[in-house]
Amino acid sequence: MPRHPNEISVVGAATRVTGRISGDGALRIEGSVKGDINLNGDAEIAEGGSVEGNLHGIGLDIGGSLLGDAHARGAIAVRAGAQVRGELRGAEVSIEAGARVSVRLDTEFELDFGGTPQRRH
Amino acid sequence: MAGTVIGEGLTIEGDISGDEEIVIHGNLRGRLTTSDAVTVGGTAVVGADITGASLSVAGQVTGDVTASERVDIQAGGKLVGDIKAARFTIADGASFKGNVDMEL
Amino acid sequence: MAESSVIGAGTIVSGHVRGDGSLEILGRVEGDVNVTGNVVIGASGRVRGSVSGAELTIAGHVQGDLRGTLAVLLESGARVAGDISSPRVGIAPGALARGHVQTDGEPAAVARPASAAARPAAAVARPDALRDLRRAAPAPAAPARLAPVAPARVAPARPNPPIQPSVAKVPARAETRAETRPEPRKPDAAKPAVAPPPAAAPPEPEFVPVRPLKVEPRRPPPPVVPVLGKGVKAKKKKSHD
């Protein structure tokens, strides 16, 4: 893991990590990780990459495969070629059409059904 | 002008209320209330009381209708129910069964 | 096909709406909507009830489940509290959703323009496409389905293209794969499968990982790795460690 938060770490395509990853800075996963990832930074699962475990970070970009929960302080973006199964929680979660997902979204927001006098919920 | 249009293939079971024009070509079973004009098209089958500014019936309506201005039953149209309106017309070829109250 | 309907912005429907044709909801519906055509819920639309149709496009607020036989697309500004299920689900940035979102298990024969050439209805028509494919059934559409995505996502430094040669070797293990698949060790044990590059061999379902196929977790990669290792690793060694 980098010592400088500005560096991007990469788990190469031919690399498999079994175990936990944690630290500061950004991480791009092109290979496979089996274990939890806990970052004080952005994480990206590149297309072709896979994570089996929970993924915690600031911003999460999922283009590959994720089997586990993803919690982001910022936004989670699921790309069209991704496959995700788990719970996604972030300030915002976007999913590109084409992604294969079976996920539970847990986003905080309120519906607004007011405005018409006779229809209050 | 914007409004509500219920197409021919649609069925609504329930109440419709609004403040804009409503055109029905499909089916309605319930109640219809608006402050604007109501048009019941030739293919429509309506089982509901209707309240509006005006009502034009070319299809089938079973229910009481109340209009602040006028009610017109077109040729081919059919209304079974009471009319309460300032003015009304029943065209030649239309069908109507009910009472009419022109006092508003 | 039947005509289209509109529930105007100043209209409230308390009851169920069903039938043929498409429907645009700009007002309010307190009840279920079930039509055969497309449903568009405008920014001013409010629906409290479930919505079923072919392609659902949501820009308003919905409290209820959404089910699209073709697609469910949430546009910026949409607010949905309910489960979403469709073969294609899109949630644009700016849209907020809460509930279960599922793209599997929805039968649909949709030809996506993005991958029109490579994605016949077969892949999409079967809800368990992925599972079926894993049973070693040929699925030419499977890898191709991800084809349009791969090139778009491939950055210049991406190792994906160089990995293609390794995929050619994979079919040799296709049979092995079929047996070893149930192994608990598989990172994509459940559903997720890694997208193979466009050149992927047909017999291999989308389950094929881009990296070398391995059964043993701790074993060093098979000969395949060195083939791509040189080029890839060189680029890879940025800030590794």
Image (cartoon, rainbow, N blue to C red):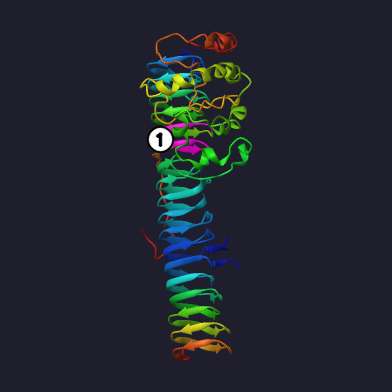
Q: Is residue B50 left or right of residue C166?
A: left
Residue C5: percent from left, percent from top? 54, 63
Where, by quadrant of the figure, is residue A19 drawn? top left
Asked if residue C236 is positioned above or below residue C77 in the image, the reply reads above
Q: Chain of mark 1?
A: A
Considering depth in this image, is C10 or B91 the residue closer to the camera? Answer: B91
Per the picture, the main secondary structure of the magenta-coloured stretch is strand
Count of residue discs: 1
- Bounds of the magenta segment: A81-101
**Residue kind at label 1, given as amino acid type:** Arg
Asked if residue A1 is positioned above or below residue B7 in the image, the reply reads above
Considering depth in this image, is A106 or A65 the residue closer to the camera? Answer: A65
Element class at badge 1 = strand
- Quadrant of the snapshot with the N terminus of chain B: bottom right
Residue C88 falls inside the magenta stretch: no
Considering depth in this image, is C97 or A6 the residue closer to the camera? Answer: C97
Residue drawn at the location 50% of the way across and 31% of the way down: A82
Residue drawn at the location 50% of the way across and 38% of the way down: A95
Residue C115: percent from left, percent from top? 61, 37
Where does label 1 land, which residue? A89
Where, by quadrant of the figure, is residue A1 drawn? top left
Asked if residue A68 is positioned above or below residue C236 in the image, the reply reads below
Residue drawn at the location 51% of the way across and 87% of the way down: B95
Q: Is residue C188 visible?
A: yes
Considering depth in this image, is C32 or C70 the residue closer to the camera? Answer: C70
Where, by quadrant of the figure, is residue C236 drawn? top right
Residue C130: percent from left, percent from top? 46, 33
Q: Is residue A27 left or right of residue C159?
A: left
